[in-house]
Image: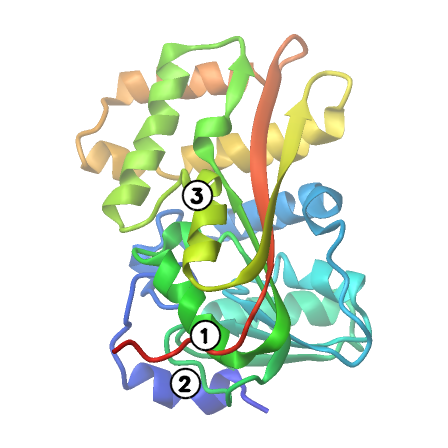
Amino acid sequence: MYTAVNTAAKTAAKSPVNSAVNTTAAPRDYVHGYSDHETRRLADQADTLAALLHTGTAYPTGSRVLEIGCGVGAQTVHLVDGSPGAHLTAVDVSADSLARARARVTAHAPGARVEWARADLFDLPFPDASFDHLFACFVLEHLPDPERALAVLRRVLRPGGTLTVIEGDHGSAFFHPDGAAARTAVGHLVRLQAAAGGDALIGRRLHPLVTAAGYDDVVVRPRTVYADASRPALVEGFTRNTFVAMVEGVRDDALAAALTTRAEWERGMAELRRTAEDDGTFHYTFFKAQAVSPGPPRPRP
């Protein structure tokens, strides 16, 4: 079994290949940070969106599943719930995140069959064709070269095995009341993520990315969230505790980069919070890609 302890020395001895969230980057490269606030936000997001994002994802008993970039285990607990008989391996580059993930899963499902590995996405410590299924949620958006990452992952996926990738797209955020300052604040997050090598608009690119990485039978479907006063759980769980909290989390970075002033930032956040009031509405689209591996990538000539 590969564990956070067993692979820590190997991972620490190498510099990251790319700046990926929870898989290849140092904590400072993750645009949202590694604070307790971010841990809570990730958990709120995963729990609120579990039915929306995980519907249709259930792995057979005995199948070998690899979760890439498990982070604090926010999605891992839902993989365990949806596929209790699968053999799940969860990978992350951060020892602290792995410890939090292990604790979360143990508290949620003490008997869950999960192995934990601290490893680099671009140098996974597994033999070829080790897994039947790969799962990655909110990982590609933080990678400078997501196509290469997808291609590299084919090595550990058996021929005929499946890939599931879920990403958001901040360009799909529409809300009422609309506000120029709110849209500008969201735009600051997009710019900061781009400066860190990521793409907060990656959802719209999933089909061409997965196809270019060499997978077959690529299908991408939108998963839309809409929240208004008739859906108070979504207003609280998604509008307030996921999206607004995510934008609020980059305040200091936006100010440090001179993208905005304190007054402009507070005006934008006030407009965003307004969308969670009784007469407000919020819309956002996630994209879920599923594909099949034809086999490991061929060496380039």
Q: Earlier in the sequence, mark 3 or mark 2?
A: 2
Q: Residue 39: horizontal and vertical position, in percent?
A: 53, 53
Q: Residue 78: horizontal and vertical position, in percent?
A: 72, 58
Q: Residue 98: horizontal and vertical position, in percent?
A: 53, 71
Q: Residue 212: horizontal and vertical position, in percent?
A: 41, 57
- In percent of the image, x 71 and y 42: which residue is there? 52
Quarter of the image for residue 234 reads top right
Q: Nearer the viewer, residue 13 or 267?
A: 13
Quadrant of the rendering where the C terminus is positioned: bottom left
Give residue 260's mark.
none
Q: Nearer the viewer, residue 144 or 269?
A: 144
- In percent of the image, x 59 and y 21: which residue is there? 282
Quarter of the image for residue 280 reads top right
Q: Nearer the viewer, residue 143 or 249?
A: 143
Q: Residues within 10 Å of mark 3 (few under 14, many from 20)?
A: some
* Residue 57 drawn above or below residue 193: below
Amino acid type, mark 3? Arg
Look at the numbered disc 3 and give the secondary structure of its residue.
Answer: helix
Answer left or right for 48 relative to 22: right
Answer left or right for 90 relative to 109: left
- In percent of the image, x 71 and y 47: which residue is there? 50
**Which label sits in the foreground, 1 or 3?**
3
Look at the numbered disc 1 and give the secondary structure of its residue.
Answer: helix
* Residue 48 drawn above or below residue 108: above
Q: Which residue is mark 1?
A: 95
Quadrant of the rendering where the N terminus is positioned: bottom right
Q: Are marks 2 and 1 in contact (CB under 8 Å)?
A: yes
Q: Which residue is mark 2?
A: 8
Q: Which residue is mark 3?
A: 205
Amino acid type, mark 2? Ala
